Image (tube, helix red, strand yellow):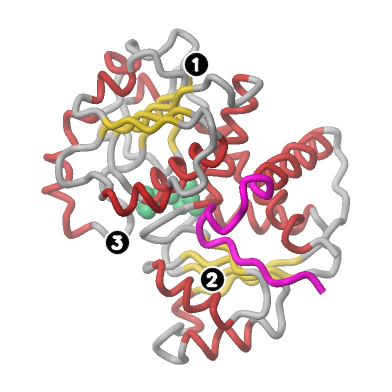
């Protein structure tokens, strides 16, 4: 029996394990493009708990599991009453006695951590307030496909120091990629968070912070942004929209990046706020490829975790 592994952040993987997951994702994608769908997870079942909305995460896991010969089921929070109808501990122990893996999108990271503590099958974080590891897997796959390799690629993150940024920085650290970050005052990572995200830093990794988004973007190969108001932060909306205004990715900002630069966004996007239409719809935009790679990268993760 394989020991149970959980992926709550990318730091739960060793660097070579992360590279193996990405390679598996690439291989499975190449096969899929040839029309081959090998049933590597035949008979296995994925339980998916969502406490927040989702399009990409839910569909990519569900379609991916189906392509791999397995099945999946959506367990909406209002139906299972996690923590209200029943304790997290009991749901975890019961659910993991029936399914082979659990994907959990939670309001609070600590809910996923508690769930994993009692689960007898692998638990995958499908986004929490702290991290979005599956997104970073797809992002790195997308960047590698674009530039042929991750060597010498530089990423600029413009906007909120949020879950998506945290996992992207963690991935960059583990894969030795340069990243520049520009966030407004009050919305920056703490030293403690930076320390945690960069624990497995590899040669080639550089993390720099810029007050001015233009300095972060100058010469970058990838310009990445995300919403200014994440799910669960709706009450802070007015304050946030004001603070983030100078951090919009528009054509003027994009022009400072490398001529071969691509634009990335995890989606959903608030067009006209963090990004303008002329950027997100431009030939430089890779948002659809990036979203599609969610499925391919997660297939790599599922096969790595579950294949017998
Ligand atoms: N990027 C992402 O996780 O999208 P969803 O919220 O639609 O799953
Ligand atoms: N930062 C966003 C990402 C959505 C995929 C949020 O947490 O709402």
Q: What quarter of the picture does the C terminus occupy? A: bottom right
Dots 1 and 2: beta carbons under 8 Å? no
Picture layout, residue 166 above or below residue 247: below
The answer for how far apart the CA atoms under marks 1 and 2 are is 36 Å
Q: What quarter of the picture does the N terminus occupy? A: bottom right
Residue at disc 2, secondary structure: strand
Picture layout, residue 262 above or below residue 8: above
Give x and y (percent) for residue 294.
Answer: 60, 45
User: In the depicted view, which residue is nearer to us: 283 or 8?
Assistant: 8
Q: Is residue 11 magenta?
A: yes
- Marked residue nearer the N-terminal end (1 or 3): 3
Who's the residue at 79% across and 34% down the image? 30
Residue 232's disc number = 3
Residue 141's disc number = none
The answer for how far apart the CA atoms under marks 1 and 3 are is 32 Å
User: In the depicted view, which residue is nearer to us: 94 or 212?
Assistant: 212
Who's the residue at 48% across and 56% down the image? 54
Left or right, residue 308 beside residue 63? right
Give x and y (percent) for residue 296.
Answer: 69, 43
Per the rendered image, the range of residues in magenta is 1-18
Left or right, residue 246 beside residue 204? left
Query: Label 2, on which residue?
Result: 49
- Marked residue nearer the N-terminal end (1 or 2): 2
Disc 3 residue lies near ligand 2 with CB under 8 A: yes
Query: Label 1, on which residue?
Result: 283
Give x and y (percent) for residue 171.
Answer: 52, 42
Mark 2: few, some, or many residues within 10 Å (few <14, many ≥20)? many
Residue 12 visible (yes or no): yes
| Quarter of the rendering containing residue 198 | top left
């Amino acid at each position: 029996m394989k020991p149970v592994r959980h992926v709550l952040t990318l730091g739960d993987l060793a660097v070579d394990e992360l590279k193996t997951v990405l390679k598996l994702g690439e291989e499975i994608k190449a096969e899929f493009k040839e029309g081959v769908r090998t049933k590597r997870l035949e008979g296995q079942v994925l339980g998916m708990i969502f406490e927040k909305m989702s399009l990409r995460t839910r569909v990519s896991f569900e379609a991916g599991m189906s392509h791999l010969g397995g099945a999946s089921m959506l367990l909406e929070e209002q139906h299972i009453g996690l923590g209200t109808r029943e304790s997290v501990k009991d749901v975890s122990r019961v659910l993991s006695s029936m399914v082979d893996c659990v994907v959990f999108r939670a309001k609070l990271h600590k809910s996923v951590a508690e769930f994993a503590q009692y689960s007898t099958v692998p638990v995958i974080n499908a986004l929490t307030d702290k991290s979005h590891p599956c997104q970073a897997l797809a992002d790195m796959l997308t960047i590698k496909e674009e530039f042929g390799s991750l060597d010498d690629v530089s990423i600029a993150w413009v906007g909120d120091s949020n879950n998506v940024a945290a996992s992207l920085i963690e991935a960059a650290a583990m894969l030795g990629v340069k990243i520049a970050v520009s966030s407004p005052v009050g919305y920056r990572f703490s030293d403690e968070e930076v320390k945690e995200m960069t624990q497995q830093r590899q040669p080639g990794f550089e993390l720099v912070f810029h007050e001015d988004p233009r300095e972060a973007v100058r010469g970058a190969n990838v310009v990445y942004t995300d919403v200014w108001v994440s799910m669960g932060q709706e009450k802070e909306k007015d304050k946030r929209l004001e603070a983030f205004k100078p951090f919009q990715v528009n054509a003027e900002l994009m022009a400072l990046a490398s001529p071969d630069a691509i634009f990335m966004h995890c989606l959903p996007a608030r067009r006209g706020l963090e990004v303008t239409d002329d950027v997100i719809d431009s030939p430089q935009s890779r948002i659809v490829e990036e979203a599609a790679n969610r499925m391919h990268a997660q297939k790599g993760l599922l096969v790595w975790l579950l294949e017998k």
